[in-house]
Image (cartoon, rainbow, N blue to C red):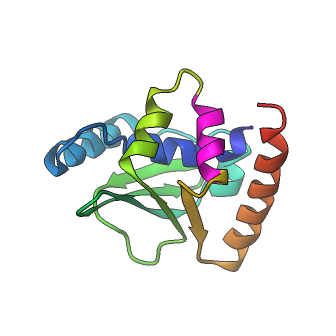
């Protein structure tokens, strides 16, 4: 179950409830202060502990960008621009992010959004494509029990 909590974390740090772009940037910076240096739990650390993740939140008229960089199982940076040589791209929209952020139990909402393509996760390296395929299979099985 913790396999996709990393992606859930990425989406939740960019929660965009009725925010302006400036407020979005402030929220990302706040999350940077709260997150940098924290260790990811296993198996998330094993699967996603060395990634350069770009995040896109698509609004009606714009795209808001953020990133999360992990190294050796720790979050080393969170920012509001895209990083070069990204290994993963996560894309969603403010409504989906809000639904996850406001849910009493965000995991089922996240899984539904992932299965309905309201959240997309794209891997750029071969090893990440394999990890993502395994994670999606695990998500399909988990959805039977959530």
Q: Is residue 113 magenta?
A: yes
133 in relation to 27, above or below? below
Q: Residue at x 18, y 42 (%)?
A: 23
Q: Residue at x 59, y 41 (%)?
A: 110
Q: Position of residue 41 (x, y in %)?
A: 65, 38
Residue 1 occupies which quadrant of the picture? Answer: top right
How many labels, in total? 0
> Who is closer to the viewer here, 29 or 135?
135
10 in relation to 125, above or below? above
Q: Position of residue 15 (x, y in %)?
A: 36, 40
Question: Magenta region: which residues?
Answer: 106-114
61 in relation to 15, above or below? below
Q: Main secondary structure of the magenta part?
A: helix
In this orientation, does residue 22 appear?
A: yes
Q: Residue at x 22, y 41 (%)?
A: 19
120 in relation to 9, above or below? below
For the C terminus, which image quadrant? Answer: top right
Residue ranking furthest to the top: 104
């Amino acid at each position: 179950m913790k396999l996709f909590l990393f992606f859930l974390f990425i989406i939740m740090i960019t929660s965009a409830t009725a925010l302006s772009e400036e407020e979005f940037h402030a929220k990302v910076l706040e999350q940077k202060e709260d997150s940098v240096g924290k260790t990811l739990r296993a198996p998330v650390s094993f699967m996603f502990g060395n990634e350069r993740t770009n995040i896109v939140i698509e609004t009606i008229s714009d795209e808001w960008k953020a990133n999360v960089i992990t190294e050796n199982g720790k979050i080393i940076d969170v920012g509001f621009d895209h990083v070069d040589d990204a290994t993963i791209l996560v894309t969603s929209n403010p409504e989906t992010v809000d639904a996850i952020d406001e849910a009493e139990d965000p995991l089922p909402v996240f899984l539904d959004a992932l299965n309905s393509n309201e959240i997309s996760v794209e891997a750029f390296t071969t090893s990440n494509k394999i990890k993502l395929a395994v994670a999606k299979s695990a998500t399909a099985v988990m959805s039977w029990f959530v």
